[in-house]
Each structure stands twice: as C-alpha cells, then as structure tokens.
Amino acid sequence: MTSFETGERRRRSPGFLIGLTLIALLLFAGFCALGAWQVQRLGWKRDLIARVDARVHAAPVPAPARATRDDEYRRVTATGTFLHDHSTLVQATTVHGAGYWVLTPLRQPGGAVLLVNRGFVPPAAKTDFDRPQGQIRVTGLLRLTEPGGGFLRANDPAADRWYSRDIAAIAAARRLAPAITSYFIDAQADSRSGSRLPIGGLTVIRFPNNHLQYAITWFALAIMTVGAYIIVLRQTAPDRRT
C-alpha cells in the first residue's frame, strides 16, 4: 500500500463517516419499505385474482340496479328488449383483429335501461349484424364504465367516434339518461348464433402481477446498499499499519 493511499484514508473525517452511515441507513430503510410494500401488493393482487375468478365461474345472478368495484366481472343475467336504433359502435382490438364493440341498450320490463356489449364486429360488417327482436335474455359479465376514452384518444360524441365504453357519455349522446345503469354487460358467446355477428364472449381478464419481481428487486438493492457501505467503509478506514 502506498503512502499516498494511506494518507488519503487517514484524511477521512468523522463527519464523512457519519454522513455515509446516515445515507446508507436511509437507502436501506427505503428499499426495505418498498420491498415490504410490494409483498403487501402481491397478497392483495392474489386475493383480487381469486375473487374475480370466483365471480366469473359462479352462477349468474340478476343484474343489479347499481354496481360497485366489488361487482366487476360478476356473472349477471337480464331480460328485456334491445333498442337497436340506439346502438353504439366502440373501437376495439380483439383476437379477431380490429373492429368494433356493439353496445346496444336493453330496456328491461321495469323500464330501466342497461347497455349490453353484444360482441365484436369487423369494420366490413359494422352495419350488417344480427338484430334480435322481442324479449331477449342476456347473460354475461358485469363491467364498470370506462370514462375518458381509449387508444390514447378521447371519445368524440359529436362525431359519434367512440374509443371506450363510457356509460354516461354514451347515455347522454343516445338520450338514455337517467333510466340507465352505471355499468354494462359483456355478453357471453351464444352457441345458437353460429357464425353470426356480433361475436360475444371475448372478455379478456388479465391482471398484471409483477409484485414478486419488484419485491425481490427492492430487497436486492437493500442488500447491495449494505455491501457497498461495507466496501466504502473499509476503503475509508485509517491504515493502522506502521
């Protein structure tokens, strides 16, 4: 070891070591807190996935008058008459390519109206799809409104361009309010429809779950902070050799 290196080490002041320790402690505590938070998020996400899976596979229940976040993806059923003249086409991308969701109001016997996403149609068939008449029974997944637009574009009711299933905006544009629910139904596929349009049952249920990887990353950074602190501390310790 050269005398220059020894001198450099001995010139480290106590204030430097105190500051170094405080910074290391703050970083270590911060990374551990973030790691613990991600572990909590992991438990929450797994519970959410389990609850949604239970709703999706449960027997359908009558469509409620109102819905909350706890009702999303619940299987529901409703009976009524489709108001085909008030249908709305919402831009969509599915396994069948780009096209539109067909959202049609369903007037129930009591007078309440709810929107039903009957399924997907390609651009070439945006005006050529099945329009069943009379009393219809719909079964599907309850979905909450999607305000604000989609595909990085805002809905344009005046031009009748829709990029998300915004219940309030669609109801206002089609003059359906206030007799309309705060949610819509993603209709399940109808085995009797054959190859007819719209194509139902295309709901994608996917919850990103990267919390375990994030937790490992934060805890790894905490361990690296300890390692770096020890290395720097050794390099800054006075050389006691004569």
Image (cartoon, helix red, strand yellow):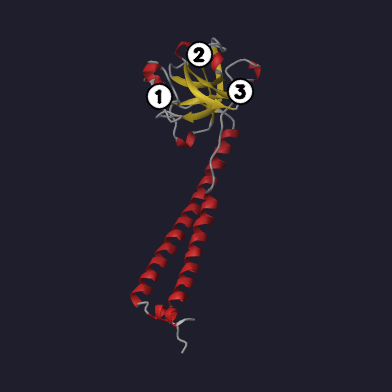
Q: Are marks 2 and 3 in contact (CB under 8 Å)?
A: no
Where does label 2 land, which residue? 81
Local packing at callout 3 (Cα closer than 10 Å; few below 14, some 14-19, many 20+) is: some
Image-based side of 27 in relation to 197, left or right: left
Local packing at callout 1 (Cα closer than 10 Å; few below 14, some 14-19, many 20+) is: many
Q: Residue at x 53, y 42 (%)?
A: 208
Report the amino acid beneath label 2. Answer: Thr
- In the image, 23 versus 234, the foreground residue is 234
| Label 2 vs label 3, nearer the camera | 3
Q: Earlier in the sequence, mark 1 or mark 3?
A: 1
Q: Residue at x 42, y 60 (%)?
A: 30
Query: At which x and y percent is residue 115?
Result: 47, 21
Q: Residue at x 49, y 29 (%)?
A: 143
Element under disc 3: loop
Where does label 1 land, which residue? 155
Q: Is residue 2 visible?
A: yes
Q: Is residue 179 visible?
A: no
Query: At which x and y percent is residue 196?
Result: 62, 15
Q: Residue at x 46, y 54 (%)?
A: 37
| Label 1 vs label 3, nearer the camera | 1
